[in-house]
Image (spheres, rainbow, N blue to C red):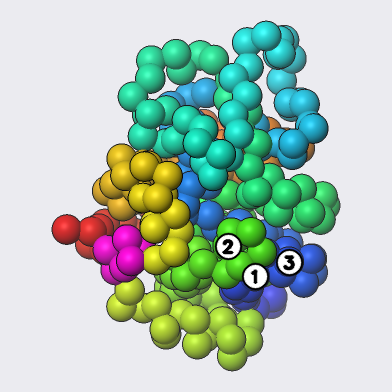
Amino acid sequence: MSPEKRVRIDAFAEGVWRCRDYEAIVCVDVITAGTTLVTSMALGRRTFSLSPTELPTGPRDSLRMSDVELMAGADEHALGPRDLHQRTDHERPLALRSKLSELLGAAPNDRSLYVACLRNLSATVTHLAGHHERVAIVAAGFGGEARFEDEMAAAWIAEDLRGWAFRPEDRATALAIDRWAQGEVGLIGLGRSAERLRTQGLHADLAFILEHVDDVRIPCQVNGNEISAAVPAAERALELEAALSQTSRFVGRRAS
């Protein structure tokens, strides 16, 4: 008899350690580091998430530091996901220094670790459902504070996992799913994170985040400090075909 599938949501970044007993941990970050990392992956770049003093390392060879573009977090006026999307130097690796990297670095290194944002919701759900029995979803927040857009996206992932026979681990998870079941992407534009981007003059990045919902078919896994596609190409083809059937609800949440 197979073990019962469970999903848990933790709305605070420090929850990454509370979730150490789960075989898979998903860090959800909507504004803006998570979206930047997933966008970089979607463009085919080698992609790294770094702490302030960390150097890029990864399972592949021949990485020259002179070829890597090091970026600070979006809160420090770095290149954002919209500008990254418009560039053509996709062969150049990207290394993003952000607060999200601190969260990823704090996760237990013997667990499968993933990054999700609005762009790769279905791909993340499909991969988790096919590979894991106990999943924890951590809403990254910002600066140690919870952010509702991260909790909302985490709840959407957990809600879809219920369709794959996952059950909420606790009452807090069930309540979060119910709270955000009817949530819409447009709500994100009313939050503190969105206001922070506007204050920094990053209106285009905010628009990009709100407009690009479930359009990336890549589940993004963390390997050391490198972000890579979670499954080999041959297996991915089958998973992504299944993921296509799951996109309509997510896409329907797009901001008008």
Question: Is 69 located above or below residue 77 in the figure?
Answer: above
Residue 131 can be seen, yes or no? yes
Task: Name the residue at 58% across, 25% down.
Answer: 94
Task: Report the side of 114 relative to 87 (left or right).
Answer: right
| Distance in Å between CA atoms under marks 2 and 1 | 7 Å
Residue 11, percent from left and from top: 60, 72
| Distance in Å between CA atoms under marks 1 and 3 | 6 Å
Question: What secondary structure predominates along the stretch shown in magenta?
Answer: helix
Question: Is 247 located above or below residue 217 in the figure?
Answer: below
Element class at badge 2? loop
Q: Which residue is mark 1?
A: 12
Q: Which residue is mark 2?
A: 141
Mark 1 neighbour class, 10 Å CA radius: few under 14, some 14 to 19, many 20 or more: some
Answer whether labels 2 and 1 touch (C-beta < 8 Å): yes
Task: Name the residue at 79% across, 54% down.
Answer: 106
Which amino acid, mark 1?
Phe
**243, 146: nearer the viewer:** 146
Residue 253, percent from left and from top: 26, 63
Quadrant in the picture for the C terminus: bottom left
The earlier-in-sequence mark between 2 and 1 is 1
Answer whether labels 1 and 3 touch (C-beta < 8 Å): yes
Element class at badge 3? loop
Which amino acid, mark 3?
Glu
Q: Which residue is mark 3?
A: 14
- Point out the stretch of residues depicted in magenta: 184-190
Which amino acid, mark 2?
Gly
Residue 157 can be seen, yes or no? no
